[in-house]
Amino acid sequence: MLVLSGIAVVILGFALRFNPLLVVTLAGIATGLAAGFDPVAVVAMLGKAFAENRFIAVAWLVLPVIGLLERGGIRERARTLIVKLRGATAGRVLTSYFVIRQLTATLGLTSLGGHVQMVRPLIAPMAEAAAEKTAPLDGETRDLIRANAAAVDNIAVFFGEDVFIAIGSILLIRGFLEQYGISVTPAHIALWAIPTAILAFVVHAIRLRLLDRRLARRKTVAE
């Protein structure tokens, strides 16, 4: 039972609001020591696990890059670009991103977008700038546009990635169906994911069209 002491360390550390990385590390050390390993062996196992899974930490390298780009004015440049485009609206900007995000997801390129990489520094500011062309934005409207920008990314990649045959969700669907005696191939699942992805685009395009109408009514009220 002492091996389970790491769980108690995690619960206690999170309850006391300690640094999550520190808590997890201490939990791993406590578990190793409770299992009878010496401290050097425990540290060696932690180092080996980190080295074998270091590709997971590569994503964190994106954060400093995005911070530098934002400090360099990427959000302002995105706004300036949209202001110069005639006919650009928040709904049209988000619909365009939906198409791009869904098409890249169908090719397995799910890492090309995302809330951190694209939505916050580029897509949301561009949609806000398009809406500001008609009337100033209040806090509630700005939050509405940002929420729709985040939703576009989520829905596009969720329904687009299933069209790509070599994706984890395909294997999950296949395993679930096989539990109930339904045998399907990954290619068959990906094929039938195409109409679902198309329908998701149609439904969300309508929602974004309604968003533009709502923003247009805001302009009328402001006048």
Image (cartoon, rainbow, N blue to C red):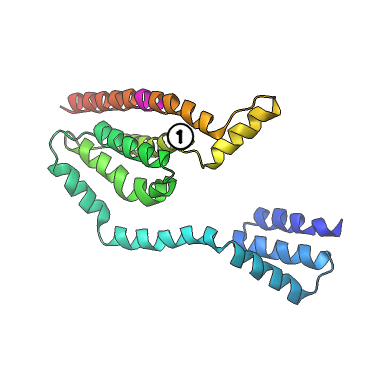
Point out the image quarter for the C terminus.
top left
Percent from the top left, x then y, of residue 136?
21, 37
Q: Quadrant of residue 42?
A: bottom right
Residue at screen point 43% across, 35% down: 160
Percent from the top left, x then y, of residue 131?
22, 36
Considering depth in this image, is 139 or 160 the residue closer to the camera? Answer: 160
Residue at screen point 62% across, 57% down: 17
Point out the image quarter for the N terminus.
bottom right
Left or right of residue 200: residue 187: right
Left or right of residue 195: residue 30: right
Q: Is residue 2 visible?
A: yes
Dominant SS in magenta: helix
Q: Quadrant of residue 168?
A: top right
Above/below status of 76 relative to 148: below
Residue at screen point 69% across, 24% down: 181
Residue 38 among magenta residues: no
Mark 1: secondary structure? helix
Furthest residue toward right: 1
Percent from the top left, x then y, of residue 126?
25, 43
Mark 1 Cα-neighbour bin, 10 Å: few <14, some 14–19, many ≥20: many
Residue located beneath label 1 in the image: 163
Q: How many numbered marks, from 0 up?
A: 1
Magenta highlight range:
200-204
